Structures are given as C-alpha cells and as structure tokens.
Image: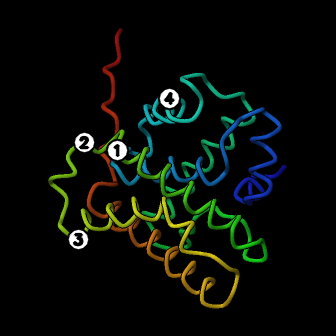
C-alpha cells in the first residue's frame, strides 16, 4: 500500500482490520483532527500517547499501522496549516447515506474526544467556537433525522459535513498550531 492510498477510507479501513483494530478510519481521523485542533504541535510526540489512550486501550500500534497514523497526523496538520485540501476521512459519496452518516457521527465523537483531551480551556474559546463545539456534539446524534435516502437528506448530509470541516478549521485557528515540544538540553 503506497502512502497516498493510506488516506483512502477503504484502504485505511482494511489496514485497521488487518491489525485487528476495532475502530473506524473516521474515528482515527477524527481523533487526530481533534488532537491537532486542540493544540498538539506537529513535532510533539505526546499526541501518540493520547491517540493510543483514546483508541487502543493505551497500547502502542503495530509498526505498519503506526507509520500510517503518523503520516495521517502529518498530512492533516499540513492541510490545516495551509488551509487547503482539508477533508474528513469518510466513505466515498457513492456509498449508502446511512454508512456515510455513521462515519460522520463517529468522526464527530472522535474529534470531540481528541479535542477534549488536549484543550481543557474551552471556556477561553470564542463564543463562535463554543457554539461550534455544541453543534459538533449534536452531530454525534443526528441519525434519526435521516429517515430516507433522497436528495433532501443528501443535501442535509453535505451541510453537516461542511459544518464539521468549518468547526475543525475554526478550532485549529483558535487553539491549533501548538507550541513545539521543548528541546531537551544536550548532556555532555
């Protein structure tokens, strides 16, 4: 599997299944986005501890999966910094709406978990971001709002998807771009 394929939902799902992980690609991406948007710096390796605590019962990841997750962290961080190409890791648009909706709700819950682990000062967030976090929390429970797969439901899904992207971007602008981990002095 080449590095570009790791950002494909189905390929990432297969990799997780291959390593007997009981999380989804959407949850992995959501936690990573939450950690980054909560303030983890790109070079602060503590994010891996938070990731493992949230998604892998505090265990480390197998080498191949760790490489893929590290690559995903780096790419998401770069996408948020450059404010371009940031997309949620979700099933393709031709997948059934209920599967995409489940992935969206998983992403939203995972984002909040990752964000909450890092960002403990949400009361210092702008009112706009506080409202956005409430909206993301509400998105974790929207399944009953989508009774059928029609154009109206598809449009509502896209609106929620874009709202999640906006929420992540707003959180990153306020709390992201964390400070690099302090350099340890060289001992001679």
**Mark 3 or mark 4, earlier in chain:** 4
The answer to which of marks 4 and 2 sits earlier in the sequence is 4
Q: Quadrant of residue 18?
A: top right
CA gap between label 3 and label 4 equals 29 Å
Q: Which mark is residue 120?
A: 2
Disc 3 to disc 1: CB gap under 8 Å = no
Give percent across and percent down for residue 74.
55, 50
Q: CA distance from mark 4 to mark 2?
A: 17 Å
The residue tagged 3 is 128
Q: Secondary structure at mark 1?
A: helix
Residue hosting label 1:
116
Is 16 left, or right, of 58 in this rendering? right
* 188 relative position to 129: left or right: right
Which numbered disc flags the more N-terminal residue, 4 or 1?
Answer: 4
Distance between mark 2 and mark 3 Cα atoms:
17 Å
The x, y position of residue 88, in whole percent, is: 57, 65
The residue that disc 4 covers is 53
**In the rendered image of this protein, does residue 107 appear above or below residue 65?**
below
Nearest the eye: 32 or 178: 32
Residue 90 versus residue 48 in the image, above or below: below
Helix, strand or loop at mark 4: helix
The disc label shown at residue 20, or none: none
Which residue: 24% across, 62% down?
A: 130
Who is closer to the viewer here, 73 or 21? 21
Q: Residue at x 71, y 35 (%)?
A: 21
Q: Nearer the viewer, residue 142 or 103?
A: 142
Instruction: Locate residue 156: give its quadrant.
Output: bottom right
Q: What crowding class fits label 3: few (fewer than 14 Cα within 10 Å), some (14-19), or many (20 or more)?
A: few
For marks 3 and 1, the one nearer the N-term is 1
CA distance separating discs 3 and 1: 17 Å
Residues at badges 3 and 4 in contact (C-beta under 8 Å)? no
Classify mark 3: helix, strand or loop.
helix
């Amino acid at each position: 599997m080449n590095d570009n394929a790791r950002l494909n939902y189905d390929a990432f799902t297969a990799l997780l299944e291959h390593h007997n992980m009981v999380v989804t690609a959407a949850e992995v991406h959501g936690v990573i986005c939450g950690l980054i948007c909560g303030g983890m710096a790109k070079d602060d390796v503590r994010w891996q501890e938070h990731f493992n605590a949230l998604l892998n019962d505090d265990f480390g990841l197998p080498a191949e999966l760790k490489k893929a997750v590290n690559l995903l962290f780096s790419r998401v961080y770069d996408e948020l910094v450059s404010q371009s190409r940031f997309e949620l890791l979700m099933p393709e648009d031709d997948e059934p709406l209920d599967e995409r909706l489940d992935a969206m709700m998983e992403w939203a819950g995972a984002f909040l978990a990752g964000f909450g682990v890092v960002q403990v000062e949400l009361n210092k967030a702008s009112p706009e971001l506080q409202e956005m976090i409430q909206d993301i929390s509400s998105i974790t429970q929207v399944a009953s709002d989508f009774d059928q797969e029609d154009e109206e439901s598809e449009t509502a899904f896209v609106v929620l998807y874009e709202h999640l992207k906006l929420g992540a971007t707003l959180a990153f602008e306020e709390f992201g771009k964390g400070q690099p981990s302090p350099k340890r002095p060289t001992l001679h």
